[in-house]
Image (cartoon, rainbow, N blue to C red):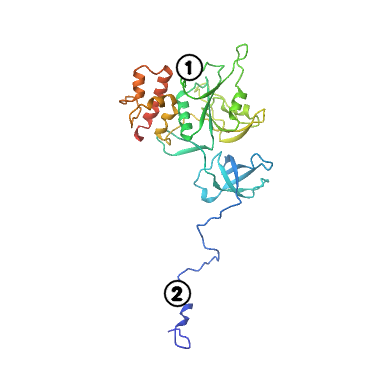
Amino acid sequence: MSWLDDDGDDELDEFDESQIRSRPNPKANRPRTKRRPAHADAEIGRVLGVDRGRYSVLLGEGTDDERMITATRARELRRMPIVTGDAARVVGDTTGDDGTLSRIIGIVERTSLLRRSADDTDQVERVIVANADQMLIVVAAADPEPRARLVDRYLVAALDAGIRPLLVVTKTDLADPAEFLRHFAGLDLQVFTSAQDASGGHAGMPIDEIGAALIGHSTVFVGHSGVGKSTLVNALVPSAGRATGHVNEVTGRGRHTSSSTVSLRYVSPGDGRGWVIDTPGVRSFGLGHVNPENILAAFTELAEIAEQCPRGCTHRAGAEDCALNEAAAAGELSEAGLARLESLQRLLATFADKF
């Protein structure tokens, strides 16, 4: 049977459903699109902490409209790590009133990113903090014993991230840190240690001096468990309330007390301001994510000597024509310099397959 109009033409074919190629929309909603709203009204805030998928974000920093909000991430950001220190773009209810929830829809380009891996062979990186410009490495003179190799790893990670390192030595009433600090002789590394009072007793940490170094900076605190990092944070930021622990007398290991990374505002007696970023204590710091070519630059005084090395030199122990090995053999390196070279070459050997 043919559908014809009065003239015998098949003009009614235009109503034939078989001629329609697009499927009907049973839900009568708009078709999906990859286009996303521009969110021109988004506000930018500092991520201060993360707790079970909820982000504490500070908006209006330094203004009369400064306020804390709680936000979740947009679905399209589910695979992007959002960490403490990030500058987040947020939309939704940004009043900060009880019960309100905003949404993070983007991250401003980061100026730095501190990372670590589980070990040196692990290519999966753990992002620790974003946009920090200083790293305060906290070690104890004793109980637990200071680990120079761990500090070396912190230095490498800091340099890889473009972050200036600082060093604090706690518990100097238990041991003299002079021998440990000789390991870092020649480095451009500001060091803070406990002071002695007039009677030769322990006078505590130089809180004011450390605080002065924090003004105008975003400083991430790192250190082995049990070295007194949380105690130092509480002294600098009295309202922090970070949990403190002790060292196990049998194992000599510290107990993890800080379980999350959090940003805290530091305010000096003179109203100078900065950010203290406290991180959980660690017993290892993998560098599987680091470019091996950046490791040498963490050893400033050795990097100058290595400029005389031939192109492609690995700088590892036994490498021929290596200016570093030649300087060591000729007695041109100090005792501290030899220790630094040993540490450098051990780290380089870890990445031997990457050269």
Q: Earlier in the sequence, mark 2 or mark 1?
A: 2
Relative vertical location of residue 124 with respect to residue 36 in this rendering, above or below: above
Residue 231 can be seen in this image: no
Q: Identify the residue at horizontal 40%, vertical 28% (top origin).
A: 347
Quarter of the view holding residue 219: top right
Q: Where is residue 330 in the image (x, y as percent from the top left)?
A: 34, 17
Circle 2 crowding by C-alpha within 10 Å: few under 14, some 14–19, many from 20: few
Compare residues 25 and 232 and report the one nearer the observer.
Answer: 232
Residue topped by disc 2? 19
Q: Find residue 131 and report its horizontal and vertical position in percent.
A: 54, 38
Q: Mark 1 points at which residue?
A: 179
Q: Residue at x 44, y 39 (%)?
A: 124
Three-letter amino acid code at the position of disc 2: Gln
Secondary structure under badge 1? helix
Seen in the image, is 14 located left or right of residue 41? left
Farthest right residue in view = 64
Is 113 above or below relative to 34? above
